[in-house]
Amino acid sequence: GAGGVFNPGTDDFTIDGNAADDTPHLVIANTAIATLSDDLYVGDHNLGALTVESGGVVSNDIGLIGHNIGSTGIATITGTGSQWNNSGMLHVGREGNGTLTVEDGGVVSNTTGYIARAGGTTGVATVTGSGSQWNNSKSLTVGRLGTGTLNVTDGGTVSNTYSYIGIKSGSTGEATVT
C-alpha cells in the first residue's frame, strides 16, 4: 500500500536550492503525512517547490512560499483528500515571489493569508475545480505591499472573515472569480 510518514527531525523545514538555478521539490503523496511542529519554507533564499497530491497531508505552523528577497516558491495542492494545514499564517510571496495552486479538490487552511506581503513581491494564488478550497479563518490580503493576484475558478472556493485588496500605497491587488 501507499502512504507513510515524512519526519525530517526538525521543528522548521526548508525546501530551498543551494544555488539560484537549483529547484528541490518535495512531494507528499498517496496518503502520506508530514507533520512539522513549526514553520514550512518553500523557497527561502532561492527556489523551492512543494506538491501535496493523491490524499497527502502536510501540517505545520506558518507556511511561507517565497520567504526572503530573491526567493521563489511554488506550492501545489491537488486531488481529493490532499491537504495543507497551517495552524498559523500562510504567505504567498512574503519577501520573495510565491505561487499557490489549489486544484481538483485540494484543501488549504490557515489563520491569516497574505498574497504579496512585502514591496517588490509578486504573489499569485489560484483555487480551481469543484471541492478545491482555501480556508482562511481570519483575514485574506491580496497585495499588501506587492502585486497580488487571486483567481477563483470552476467551482473553487475561498473563505475568510474579511479581505483587503491592494491595501497599502504602491500595492496592486486583483481578485477574479469566474
Image (tube, rainbow, N blue to C red):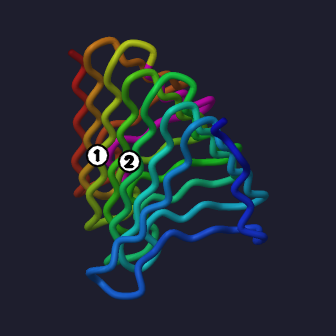
Q: Residue furthest bottom?
A: 19
Tag 2 near tag 1, CB within 8 Å? yes
In the rendered structure, the answer to whether residue 23 lies left or right of residue 133 reads left
In the rendered structure, the answer to whether residue 12 lies left or right of residue 139 reads right
Q: Residue furthest front?
A: 1
- Residue 167 in picture, x, y percent from top left: 35, 45
Which residue is found at the position 60% from the left and 32% from the top?
138
Q: Secondary structure at mark 2?
A: strand
- Residue 47 part of the magenta-drawn span: no
Residue 3 lies in quadrant = top right
Foreground residue among 103 and 134? 103
Q: Quadrant of the C terminus?
A: top left
Q: Quadrant of the N terminus?
A: top right
Residue 76 disc label: none
Foreground residue among 57 and 120? 57
Task: Please give the residue where the numbered disc 2 appears in the rendered image.
Answer: 115
Question: Of the residues under marks 2 and 1, which one precedes in the sequence?
Answer: 2
Residue 42, placed above or below residue 173: below
Which residue is found at the position 62% from the left and 29% from the top?
137
- Residue 77 in picture, x, y percent from top left: 45, 38
Foreground residue among 159 and 109? 109
The amino acid at mark 1 is Val
Write the start and end of the magenta stretch as one range: 132-144
- Residue 30 in picture, x, y percent from top left: 57, 37
- Residue 138 part of the magenta-drawn span: yes
Which residue is found at the position 49% from the left and 59% from the top?
26
In the rendered structure, the answer to whether residue 43 lies left or right of residue 135 reads left
Task: Please give the residue where the numbered disc 1 appears in the rendered image.
Answer: 124
Chief SS of the magenta region: strand
Q: Secondary structure at mark 1?
A: strand
- Residue 12 in picture, x, y percent from top left: 69, 68
